[in-house]
Amino acid sequence: MGSSYKTARSWLQSLLFLNIVIPTVASAEPRPEHMVYLRTIDPTIEQDIRYAGAHNFTGHPLDGYAAAECLMTLDAAKALARVQTALRSQGYGLKVFDCYRPNRAVADMGRFANEPGDPRKAEFYPRVDKQDFWRLGYVARVSNHSRGSTVDLTLTGPKALPAAAWAPSAAQVDCTAPYAQRWHDGALDMGTGFDCFDERTHTANPTINATAKDNRQRLSSAMEKEGFSGYSKEWWHFTYAGASTPNEVMDFPITPLSASEALDASHQLIVVTSKNWDDIQGTAQRYERDGKTFRKSGNPFAVVVGKNGMAWGKGLSSAEPDDGPVKREGDGKAPAGVFKLGTAFGYDNTAETKLPYLALTPTIECVDDSHSARYNQLVDGSKIAKDWNSAERMRSEEGYRKGIVIEHNTPASPASGSCIFFHIWRSPSSPTAGCTAMDQTDISRLFDWLDPRQSPLLVQMPEAQYEHLRERWNLPER
């Protein structure tokens, strides 16, 4: 495990924080050249790709979503970036929930509608029978999303409630409930939540409040000015109608960006280096994009890593052949490579951060029993039936008073290491079992500085490996 506080038994087991293991994606057609990752065109557009996880009307990750990434045709992505520019000048912004959708994911939705079980009905379709999804127009047998120029999105702004960090144990609240009561997705009040199957999601529904009507109108107007047309039954659904818009249905899987693609799209980096593979101490430096490269932000600060140093981990980069150890579960090593940064968490009920934030309660646990259906998940043990014999109570670890998820081994492979965080150190000389730990002042600074709209990344490895990869990946000088 990642914390210096875990017992030998617990860190020999694994956990994937706040994620569900996504089924292996079968091979299919390659990604066409005209399809691009939105974050490479405009990383300031926020992303919450719901079908890559379980927080959607089906309650499971859809087939074909091996990464939580928005892909679109190049022309549609550029048009969406123009919408974002116009909205930002007015103090608003965009957050996307879904973009290109593999055809196999559409088929997955269809299977769900015909199978027994309603795991998320109370939140997403409390007044609808799922066998009526097609008749009511909420699910299509062929989706425009599979053509690459359709997007589901919402509007962000200064009056939006902060985004909450979702976990499978989260209470289900009707998606048509008042704004303050329903799920906090980080967006303005749009009258309902996303993926809500109800007449109140119809764009011109007269029963929503005046604020929601204004927000829907603002979003629709901004989108229409750049060539997007809406869908009358879903306020969040828009299709780009440019002259070069392709018409073919596609089925290639959504996979992660490569390390070089992700770095090119990132505007915030945290670089952590150590002297060698076995060193337990390192130095961290923040960087911000400056044109085609990066400039330093603030002063360097000290960190500690795994008690056995580092090893190549499973992130956006793959292990370099014949160049150092490869991380395994329970090896006491911090992962080396390039990693996305996820949810912030801590003991306080709220926190000053732009990251999604999870307040740790006494009953939130990390399940590290590999036989459990909740394995590699963060759960509220007081709200669900337990099927595990081993778990760690997050609130019992002082180092987790403030922390940030490092998205290592996502989706998870059982033997590749798990539960990797930034968190507060015990002391400058006390290593962890795999996390990267630091002084509380430094992690507080990260809470304040990190912004999901800047596509922040962690680059972590020994100095020699960093220098070897620096030119290839266009990394900043240390």
Image (cartoon, helix red, strand yellow):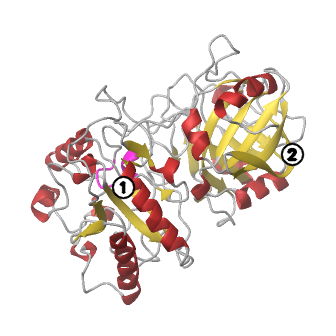
Residue at (42% x, 36% y) in the render: 255
The residue that appears at 58% across and 53% down in the rendered structure is: 363
* Residue 64 image position (x, y, % from top left): 32, 37
Compared with 184, 474 (above or below) is above
Magenta run includes residue 6: no
Left or right, 219 with respect to 413, comes to left
Q: Position of residue 143 (x, y in %)?
A: 20, 51
Q: Secondary structure at mark 1?
A: helix
Q: Which residues are magenta?
A: 50-59
Tag shown at residue 140: none
Q: Nearer the viewer, residue 406 or 238?
A: 238
* Name of the residue lying farthest toward the top: 322
Residue farthest bottom in this picture: 210
Compared with 305, 62 (above or below) is: below
The quarter holding residue 435 reads top right
Residue for badge 2: 301
Main SS category, magenta section:
loop
Crowd around label 1: few <14 · some 14–19 · many ≥20 (10 Å): many
Report x, y in % for residue 393: 63, 45
Q: Which mark is residue 76?
A: 1
The one of 477 and 321 positioned closer to us in this rendering? 477
Determine the image quadrant of residue 21.
top left
Residue 57, magenta (yes or no): yes
| Residue 161 relative to residue 131: left or right | right
The vertical placement of 242 against 32, above or below, is below
Q: Earlier in the sequence, mark 1 or mark 2?
A: 1
Helix, strand or loop status at disc 2: strand
Q: Amino acid at mark 1?
A: Ala
Label 2: few (<14), some or many (≥20) within 10 Å?
A: some
Image quadrant holding the N terminus, namely top right
Q: Is residue 397 visible?
A: no
